[in-house]
Amino acid sequence: MTSIKDVANLAGVAVGTVSRVINNSGAVKPKTRKKVEEAIQELNYFPNEVARNFKMQKSKMVALLLPSIWNPFFSELAYYIEDELDREGFKLMLCNSGGKPEKELYYLEMLRQNKVAGIVGITYNDIENNVSNNIPIVSIDRHFNKKITCVTSDNFEGGRLALRELVRAGARKPAFMGSVTSVFSETMNRRQGFIHEAEALGIDYVIYEKPDPIVDDNAYIHEFLNEHGDVDGIFAITDMLAASYIDKARRKGIRIPEDVKVIGYDGIQDNPYFHPILSTIRQPVEEMARMTIRLLYNKIEGIPLDKQVYRIPVKFKQGETT
Amino acid sequence: MTSIKDVANLAGVAVGTVSRVINNSGAVKPKTRKKVEEAIQELNYFPNEVARNFKMQKSKMVALLLPSIWNPFFSELAYYIEDELDREGFKLMLCNSGGKPEKELYYLEMLRQNKVAGIVGITYNDIENNVSNNIPIVSIDRHFNKKITCVTSDNFEGGRLALRELVRAGARKPAFMGSVTSVFSETMNRRQGFIHEAEALGIDYVIYEKPDPIVDDNAYIHEFLNEHGDVDGIFAITDMLAASYIDKARRKGIRIPEDVKVIGYDGIQDNPYFHPILSTIRQPVEEMARMTIRLLYNKIEGIPLDKQVYRIPVKFKQGETT
DNA sequence: CACCAAAATGGAAACGTTTCAATATTTATT
DNA sequence: AATAAATATTGAAACGTTTCCATTTTGGTG
């Protein structure tokens, strides 16, 4: 492989000069620059980025650590994250943890050894405590402790909005469905917002929490259908849960939205060809992604952040289910 | 940062010895090994992977270059690719090209500078000609020239299968819909298989090709509906096109599958909650992903491959539309 | 105990950059 | 034309590994 030394030789200058040319750093005479550029052309030289990273003791690689890229919410997020990173010449390394703590730790260790510039984490562990060194981290949707910066949609407001929309659509007794047991997850606030708004409006409501996030949705939904025949509105904590509920409810002869209005959370549907088109609280994925990366840049450059948690406003997206 | 030198000092040995310990290479006395391991513990030392990559002149990074991770087909693919890579300690770098040639070239250049171990390409350019150096590449679904290895689903067989299933479901006059203008794309074979089988069975058929892949599906589908009222079976070249067709056909009062049977291609739906559940030719995404990576490993290690194109069998997946 | 082969260890070179102090060259000023 | 100041260039050190040759240590054998 041709190196900076070969270029220097051919151009008849010292390696330092070539370095200054390719980095546009320091002064170099136009004539010299030309010679060097010609040599670069001639030899088809390109700088060895690995050597640079090594010498500089830092890379332009950011890791995205998430449960599964297969999940459409995460893949949309990844899309925008990559786009934003690319604007500053950063590269994206993708790590699927499967949500398994041991895999998260394994990746964290690997990332540290690889001296990545930063990490975007969507994790189930208190990663900050495990990353003993100081790789800049921004977390999405979960905040564990005071040290870690978190970007999230405004879950509380989303919960309030969902309740209001259900009521506006005619629901008299709305229910909250879903699992919020992941203690550090921001999702708990969706429930809190829902409750807060219901009480503010003096509306009768049901909280039907799923005790264990792992357990099968089917049994949970069936049980709900049996126990709460009087509910006429559902706020499901995710779109997937909403879709699953609708499927089962319809099989029981319940009409959506006539009998029961349903609102999800996320806004994963990006085409209008698959039904039901969910009414949902849309997470501002693009904005979250871009903000996450810009905050990470600040951290990488040591610029202090003014907040610990950044909440991005959500919007209601009208579908066919309210 | 603590380096191998610090460990050597603390353990009272030479750096070479420490290196042999952490790499399990060469002989080292149990007693010495113990000393070194203690020092490593004590100092919380971990090897600098960047320095290693530099010294070894190779990294364990594989790049996945694709149009958009947001596309569910690609995100599933990426999921399995990452999983397979991880088994051998390789890492995945994600590059969204947006399908734009200039962006593909830009990324290719960057990957070369970063000395990635290999590339998985889902591209619209004849990348092999642009990657003048010899980074190992495996392409998915497109093969441009004789040099580049390609993994694809068995598109020809998929086309035959689609035709057969439409006929089996009762179609008397099936049509092929979609754009195959991307010359190097393997997708052309879907059409060819469809035609081949129709002629073998002596079935009347329609080829309604979309001339320009960029142009809006809506107009194309409307035109089709006006011109081909007698068609009672559709093989759409992608699931998305199938879903779009179904949406528009139903608005016109056409019943699916009673009036027209529809089969897509891809198998992107992985949950049964959104309708229509498409009958489709399912690409064996997981198998394609794993085979791609294993072929790439061979290329990385210089093991010659026995074929140029690897076709993985497809399966018909019954949905609600046939 | 002396000797030898085998095993273990030491230590320097090399990988391709950037950086910086030292030196050389150019330009401006008188 | 001499000098000072500004500009340009050189070349070596350093980054943290691995590797390989040279040297030392070990253990077994006669």
Image (spheres, coloured by chain):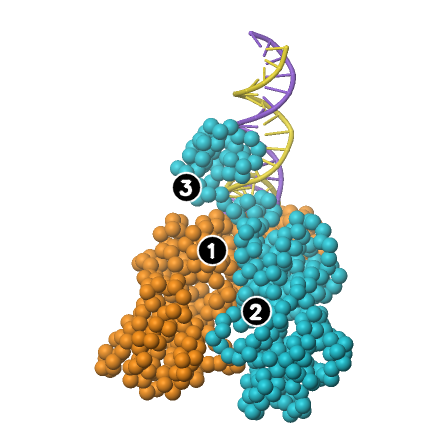
Chain colours: A cyan, B orange, C yellow, D purple
B315 relative to A291 in the view: left or right: left
Is residue A218 visible in this depiction of the protein? no
Measuring from the top left, give residue A186's x and y in whole percent: 69, 69
The residue type indicated by label 1 comes to: Ala
Residue depicted at 69% across the width and 55% down the height:
A133
Instruction: Tell which tag, 2 or 3, sits nearer the viewer.
Output: 2
Which element type, helix, strand or loop, lies under badge 1? loop
Tell me whether circle 1 and circle 2 mark residues in contact (CB < 8 Å): no
Tell me whether circle 3 and circle 1 mark residues in contact (CB < 8 Å): no
Asked if A93 appears above or below B199 in the picture, the reply is above
- Which of the 4 quarters of the picture holds residue A218? bottom right
Asked if A267 appears above or below A57 in the picture, the reply is below
The residue type indicated by label 3 comes to: Asn
Quadrant of the snapshot with the C terminus of chain B: bottom left
- Label 3 sits on residue: A44
Residue B237's label in the rendered image is: none
- Which of the 4 quarters of the picture holds residue A315? bottom right
Residue A73's label in the rendered image is: 2
- What is the crowding at mark 2: few (fewer than 14 residues within 10 Å), some, or many (at least 20)? some
Which element type, helix, strand or loop, lies under badge 2? helix
Asked if A26 appears above or below B95 in the picture, the reply is above
How many numbered discs sit on the rendered protein? 3
Nearest the camera: B24 or D30?
A: B24
Is residue B42 visible in this depiction of the protein? yes
Nearest the camera: B111 or B40?
A: B111
Letter of the chain that mark 1 sits on in the rendering: B
Residue depicted at 55% across the width and 62% down the height:
A78
Whole-angstrom CA distance, mark 1 to mark 2, is: 30 Å
Decide which of tag 2 and tag 3 comes sooner along the chain: 3
Tell me whether circle 2 and circle 3 mark residues in contact (CB < 8 Å): no
Measuring from the top left, give residue A85's x and y in whole percent: 56, 54
